[in-house]
Each structure stands twice: as structure tokens, then as C-alpha cells.
Amino acid sequence: MPSDRSASARLGIALMSGLLLCLACGVIGFYELFSTFLPYDDEGLMMLSNQLFLEGYQPYSEITWLYGPAQLAWVQLLHGVAAIPITHNAVRLITLAVWLSVAAISGAVALRLTGSRVWAAIAFLLSFLFTRSIVNEPGHPQGILTVAVLAIPLISALNGGNRQWWTGFVLGSIVAVTAAIKPNAGVFNLAAVGVAVLGQVGSCRWHRLLTGIVVVGSMVFPLLLMYPLLSHVDCLRFALISGFSTAAVAITACTARVPGADFPALARGVLSGLAVTSIAALGYVLVLGISPADIIVSLLGYAARQLDFYHFFRAYLPVQVALGAASLLCAVAVMFCRHRATVQGLLVAAKGWFVLAAFYSLAVNDPAHAQAMLGWAGPWCWSVVILDRSSQASMARLLLAAIAAWSPLLAYPVPGSQLYFGSLPVLLAALVCLADLVPQAMNWMARRSLMQRGETGLLRVIQSGVLFLTLVLLYGQFETARTRYTSNPLLGLPDTGYLRMEGRSADHFRELVAVADQHDLVLTTFRFNSLYFWTSADFPGAQYLSQFTLEYSSDAQQAAARQALQQARRPLVIDRMDLRKARVKGGLYWLDEEFETFRRIGPYLLLRPRKDGEGAV
């Protein structure tokens, strides 16, 4: 009875602690989300896309749709079945719930792999802080995608070695879902799960050949993916770092066997899950009346246009590439060297560097810490697979290492928020490695009589120290977000609710809306899609919807915008000064010929049709 009571008390304390963490992060997230509005306005693009879809327009053909059909189902569920309105308030509160879900599943992964509630709490908080970039793009599916990706190692950890066909089925289904959200993410997750499963094929005649194919393929894949842009030196370095990381995980997967792993059952389960979920997604698409060919053409066209002009790369150092190569060599040595002491020393050194690199990356000023996480820590994620050389690998750890190696490829060709969400598994793997190293350090000191064997005081000190530093970071984030939120005025425009904005920006937006309300149609050259939720003026039309600025839109979209302006009684064009100065010569020539500037509001230029007979100035 006393033990039952103590267990219940511990469970109650754990639940209460979890609720407090969620509440604290929820408050911070609210302040962050409702005090941030970025000029590229991806939030408005997602909101307008969702609204047009629910109004009956066909995605991929009649309107631009950037993601796969799973995003359509998500929109129908939230804004159709649940009838949640498409407003800034609703979209940002949903984003907050997703953000907390990312942190919660990160904590769950850490709990299953370390067995410690303290490490789980640290993982929850660090994941929440690390993925703060979600506030820049409310409504984007990257949060849901991250929950699905982190579910891959969690499912394996929860199931252990039992019912392996069913585990494989769930893994295959998750991979198919991620592909139906973001196709390139699905490819990377399929590669991660495939490498982990193929590594368990066991001894066979073709094992060495298969190992070579998997390792070389993993190394070459990032280079092939980024081949169109490898002339950029930072793209080449990014590809090499990623290739070393994926190859190191592949060599580890093919040599560090998981005890009791049933390759045939796992493989059949993964293939079954992929097939069943993919068929279900195809059926959903056909029920909506969407052509699969339209999806393929639309998404490939979007990818091609990004490669043409909308791409950039963070700066990576030659030393990071060299360390990536050293990591691969270290993985080979750990897996094949027969000298036990040497192997153990290399593994501890790899884990130690991995942890130091990851926590150094956290200390780097935003927004570069995700880039540092990929460059300094990413290639060493293979070291999380085994606790030490005397222990055996677990499928959950192997899958965590695999997604940590493959997910950062999401940052190609634009390392925005994708870099943060793609690098999150790297941070989790490093935290698990830290949890591995602490008991090993205690045992080492005990063998040298530096402390009593089995003493837990040092463990508690280290856990408490890391937790304290994490809470300090959390409090700093709270103060920054609260100050920004409370010092700014409410925007006060329709559907904005709790959204606050810096005073001058808020004044500019209110003036823009006041002018727009005096016109029957408004076109913005820079895709200010949120404006259409604030004004009574009409939108130029479904075909105008795009993620690209008007200058880089297709000829058909420009023609549709031009026709809509010509047919309007009182059209208004809103341009931005920085874009006008950077515009290529001859870009939007028709706009310069047919419209003139009549007013300026902050950085925005307001244009109206020229009078008959007037030419371009």
C-alpha cells in the first residue's frame, strides 16, 4: 500500500509539473505569437488559401496550394468540421497548440529514451525555445509535420521489440502522412526509416554489398538533391555536411544490430503502412475531384521556381566540413575496431563533442543557432544509437539518429523555419547523449575512488544545473515577449483580435486599410494577403493567389491581375519602396505604364490608374 501511494504521488507530481510547464510555455507562446507580424506575410497566404479552398476552389489547379493533400484534410477538419473561423486569432491559437504539441512529443521521446522526468522536462523546454520561429509563419504545417516526424522514434520506443509488423505499419503510415503534408519531407523520412530497417537485414550473402549501397547512397543523396545549386560554395558545404551525417548513421545502422529485430516483419509492416495510407490519401484526393497529375505538376513547378530565383544558403565553414568527415571516420572506427578500450574512448569522445556542439549552438545568438546545430553537431548524431560499446542498439535510438541526420535536408533550398524544425531531432539526440554520459562519468569516478559507486548526488546536481539554465532561458524569453506585447498597441483591425504591433507599423496598416476601403479592388505587388481580411475591397481573383511577389509570378497570373485591375471601377495598387528599387529593369512594365503613385504611407506606395493620354513618367 505505501508503495502504491508513493507511486500515485509521484505520478501526481509529474502531471502537475507537466501542466505547469505547458501553462508557462503557453503564456510565453501567446505573447510571442500575438506580438509578431513579418512583412512576407505567409500567414495571410495560408489563410487566404484555406478560405478559397473552403469556398469551393480546386487546389493545385484553380488556386495555388503549397503543400500536399494532408494539409487539405487538416483545413477541412479545423475550419470545416470544427467550424473554427479563419481569423488571425484562431490561426495563432491553433499554432500555439501545435507548438506546445511539438514540445510535448519531444519530452515524451526524451522520457522513453532516458527514463528520467527531469531530462524529459528539459527536452520539453529546450524544444519549445528552439522552435520559436513558428511565430513567424502562423498556420504553416511545419509544426504538425514535426509532431509526425518525432512520432517515428516514439512509436518504436513505446512498442519495444513486440509486434514488429504493427510497429513497421505505423512507421510506414507516418512516413506516408509526412509525404502527404510535404513531399520532400516524406522522401527524407522514408530514407531515414529505410536505412534503419535495412540495417536489420542480418547476416546474408549480400550483406556487405547491401551495406555498401546503403552507405554510399546515403552519402551521395544530399549531393544529388542539391546538384542544381552546388556551384554555391555554401550549398556544397551544406551537402557535404549532410552527406557525412547520413552516411555515418547508415554505417551505424548496418553494423549496430538491434537485439530481436525481425527484418521481414518490419519491412512488410513499413511497406503495408505506406501502401494503405497512400491509397487512403489518393482516395481522399479523388473524392475532392482533384487530379493527382495537377498535384504533381503544381508542386514540381513550385520547387522549380524556388530553384530559379528564390533560394539562399547559410554560411558553413571548411572546418565544419572537416569535422563532418571526422565524424564519419569515427563512426567507422567505433563500429569495426575490435579494441574495446579504444572503441569506448572514441564513443565517449563522440558523444562528448556532440553534446558540447549542440549546447554551444544553443548559446549562439538567434537566428544562427539552428545553422550552428546543423554544422557543428549534426554529423555526430550517430553516437546516440548505442549507450556504450558493451550495450546493444535500440530501434528507437537508431530511428532518432536517422531522422536527426535526414530532417535537416528540409533547409534546402531555403533555410528559414525549416532549418529549426529540421534540426530539432539533432538537439533531442544530443540531450539523450548527455543523459548517457552522466552515469558513465559517475562510474568512471567511482572506479578511481573519486566518489562512491552508485552515488546519485552528482546526477541530480547536473540535471538540476541544466534544468536551471533552461529555466533561465525560458524566463528571459518570457520577459522579452511580455515586454514587446505589453508595450505595443492593439492593431485594432477586423479579425486581428489580440494582435499587437509596433506603433508605426500599426499606424501604417490602419492608414492602408482606410484608403483600401475607398476602393473596390486592391492589388498588392508583394503579396500582403492579410490585408484582404481587414478591408472591404475585393481580392483580384483566385488565380492571383501566389507565394511569389508579382514581379516573379507567371505570365498567366500577371495577366489575370492586370485584367482584374482594368475591370475594376476604382482599383488600387499597393507597392513597396524596397521592392521597387530592387526590381529588375522592365519588371512589371505594364504597371509602370498604366499606374502612377499618388500617396506614400511609410514604406508603402499607393498607385492609381493614370489619366487618359498620360504616359509613364
Image (cartoon, rainbow, N blue to C red):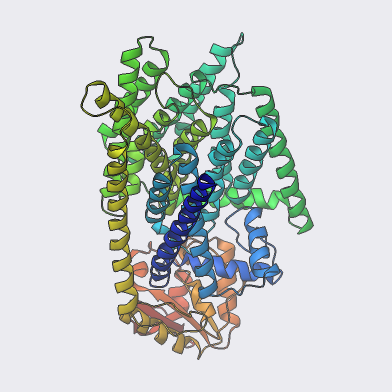
Q: Is residue 260 left or right of residue 512?
A: right
Q: Residue at x 32, y 59 (%)?
A: 474
| Of the pair 109 and 19, the residue shown nearer to us | 19
Q: Residue furthest bottom?
A: 518
Q: Is residue 160 above or below residue 259?
A: below
Q: Residue at x 51, y 28 (%)?
A: 394
Q: Residue furthest left?
A: 450
x and y percentages locating residue 160 in the rendered image: 59, 33
Q: Residue at x 45, y 88 (%)?
A: 515
Q: Can residue 610 be seen in this snapshot?
A: no
| Of the pair 28 and 492, the residue shown nearer to us | 28
x and y percentages locating residue 260 in the rendered image: 60, 22
Q: Can residue 386 be seen in this snapshot?
A: yes
Q: Is residue 274 left or right of residue 388?
A: right
x and y percentages locating residue 539 in the rendered image: 57, 77
Q: Quadrant of residue 351?
A: top left
Q: Residue at x 48, y 36 (%)?
A: 400
| Of the pair 234 and 376, the residue shown nearer to us | 376
- Quarter occupied by the C terminus: bottom left
Q: Residue furthest front?
A: 1
User: Tag count in the figure?
Assistant: 0
x and y percentages locating residue 119 in the rendered image: 39, 44
| Of the pair 458 and 348, the residue shown nearer to us | 458
